Amino acid sequence: MNRLLPLVAVLVVVFLIGCTAENLSKALYPSFEKAIFDQTNTIRSSAGLAALVWDDKLAEIAREHSEDMAKNNYFSHTNLQGESPKDRGLRHNYTVVGENIGKISPYLSGGDKYEYNSSDGMAKLMMQFWMAGQHKYNLLNPSFTSMGVGIAYNGNEYLITQTFK
C-alpha cells in the first residue's frame, strides 16, 4: 500500500491541474441553463402567461452566441460578423424572434439570497436584472411559445443568451 501512495499523490495532482476554473464552470452550464429556463417560466406564470417549452435548436443557437461572445471578448446582440439574432437563426434554418443577453460573475454575491457559484442564485439575480429593464418584454411576450438558453464562461463571467420563438 505504501508503494502506491506516491502514485496516488501524482494522480491527484494531475486531476487538480486538469480541473481549471473553465472546466469546473462548464460543469455548471446544464444546471445554470435549466435554472434560467425555470426562472423564466416562474416569472411568466406569476404574470398569468403560459409556460415556454424548451427548444433544443434555440438552445444550440443561444449557446453558439454565448460561446462566440466569450471567445471573441464582446457583448452584443450583433456578432462580429454583423449577424443579428434573426440572422443567426436563419443560418441554422430556424426562426428566432427574440433574444436576451446578460453576463454575471460567479463571484457576485447578493448577500443572504445568493450563494457563490449557485446556478439557482445566479439565475435569480440574472432574472432581476432582465426584469428591471427592456429585457422583460421578451420574458413576458405572450406570443412566444418556446425558448432556448446558452451559457459560456470567458474566465471572468458567464455570458447568457436566451433565444425565443
Image (cartoon, helix red, strand yellow):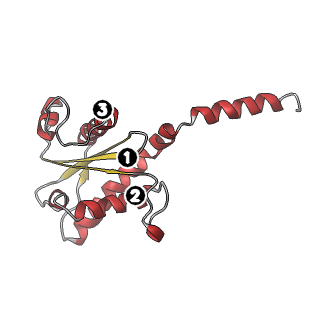
Q: Residues within 10 Å of mark 1 (few under 14, many from 20)?
A: many
Of all residues, the one furthest to the right in this rendering is 2
The mark that comes first in sequence, 1 or 3, is 3
Residue 158: mark in rendering = 1
* Image position, residue 108 (x, y; %): 43, 57
Q: Secondary structure at mark 3?
A: helix
Residue 72: mark in rendering = 3
Drawn side of residue 26 relative to residue 99, left or right: right
User: Are the two marked residues, 3 and 2, in contact with CB atoms closer than 8 angstroms?
Assistant: no
In this picture, is 40 found above or below 90?
below
Q: Secondary structure at mark 1?
A: strand
Instruction: Please name the amino acid that badge 2 sits on.
Output: Met
Q: CA distance from mark 3 to mark 2?
A: 23 Å
Residue 122: mark in rendering = 2
Viewer-closest of 130 and 111: 111
Instruction: Please name the amino acid that badge 3 sits on.
Output: Asn
